[in-house]
Amino acid sequence: MTSKNSSLLLVIMLATLFLCCRIAVAQDTFSIVAIDSLTGEIGSAGASCVSSSSSYPHGAQILSDVIPGIGAIHTQAAWDPANQSNAHDWMMMGLPPQQIIDSLVAHDAGGNPTTRQYGIVDYNGGHPRSAAYTGMNCSNYKNDTANLNYSIQGNILMGQQILDSMQTRFLNTTGTLADRLMAALQGAKVIGADTRCAVHGTSSESSFLRVAKITDPADSLYLDLWMAYPAGTTGIFPKDPIDSLQILYNLWKASTLVREMERIPAYPIRAFTDASGMCIFDFTLCKNWSSLSLKVIDIYGRCIKSAKVTSRIMKVNPGNTRSREILLYNVTDRDQHVVEKGKLIR
């Protein structure tokens, strides 16, 4: 082999090693995914000692996948885009969180699931489910906790107190789902929460907060905020990224006049699926329910039910075809104005 060829081979080997290492060290550190089963909102928040770069343009936000009306997935610790893509596809197929995690472990894109960490929740027609996984070879300190409508996970942490504080803040804060997620992040705002960031005098280098309403388009979430210091920033940071995110969130609330917990809808309609897959529409709290009409369609636009509302509780049997695992519905008044619309996951 010539010297020129040897040099070229060395360059290729080093480049390959560099790319592999980039994936292996992408340790996105502490995060939470959660569901509000009353509003159907799905949320995702987290922070990490990962900066903004060409590989991670929004810093830690790269780990977040929020699917409106369906669920949220966090793939972190040795982040691999193939694993994240697979998890997304399996959730769209209707797999529950634990089965998605089992599949991720069994079919890890890099052949080593022990370095990964996952947190997953799904809406499940108003009956949320969650699951978490922490590989034994994730960097210490690492752990997770999941309970019905939320999952909290972290690695390279100062200790268990970071996760405990996030959980306490999330469970004991009143307000919207976004308020509670922001409070959970504030619970982790400790210098060196991600131990790599102690040198900067902060908890992290980047943070994010995302919330989807049930009818949001996948590429346009109701709330989507992030903050990240650029790659190469050194020394003591002027402000913790979680505090910077809090400022952005406060401005977002003020500018959009969001008061979801205080607003009483004119037509408070509850829609969900029961254990048999039947679609249930509850109009009990609607004063003028008898003036309404209901329409239910599948994801291909085929009408399943179109009828006047004739009772306070209406049941719709969508059948058993796969195209009816996700259903859309709208409710109109006597003037054919849409007063409520939403999505059901069977």
Image (cartoon, rainbow, N blue to C red):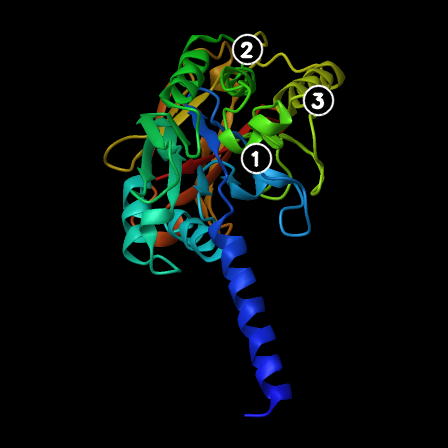
Residue at screen point 42% across, 36% down = 344
Q: Nearer the viewer, residue 13 or 273?
A: 13
Residue at screen point 52% across, 24% down = 192
* Residue 144 seen anywhere in this rendered image of the structure: yes
Q: Secondary structure at mark 1?
A: loop
Q: Secondary structure at mark 3?
A: helix
Q: Is residue 106 above or below residue 75?
A: below
**Mark 1 or mark 2: whose residue is earlier in sequence:** 1
Pointer 2 and pointer 3: residues touching (CB < 8 Å)?
no
Question: Residue 164: x percent and y percent?
Answer: 38, 17
Question: Residue 238: x percent and y percent?
Answer: 73, 22
Q: Which residue is mark 3?
A: 248
Which quadrant would residue 224 be assigned to in this image? Answer: top right
Quadrant for the C terminus, please.
top left
Q: Nearer the viewer, residue 44 or 346?
A: 44
Q: Nearer the viewer, residue 329 or 312?
A: 329
Pointer 1 and pointer 2: residues touching (CB < 8 Å)?
no
Q: Which residue is mark 2?
A: 261
Which quadrant would residue 38 be assigned to in this image? Answer: top left
| In the displayed structure image, the side of residue 96 where residue 341 appears, left or right | right
Q: Which residue is mark 1?
A: 49
Residue lying at the far bottom in this picture: please name it. Answer: 1
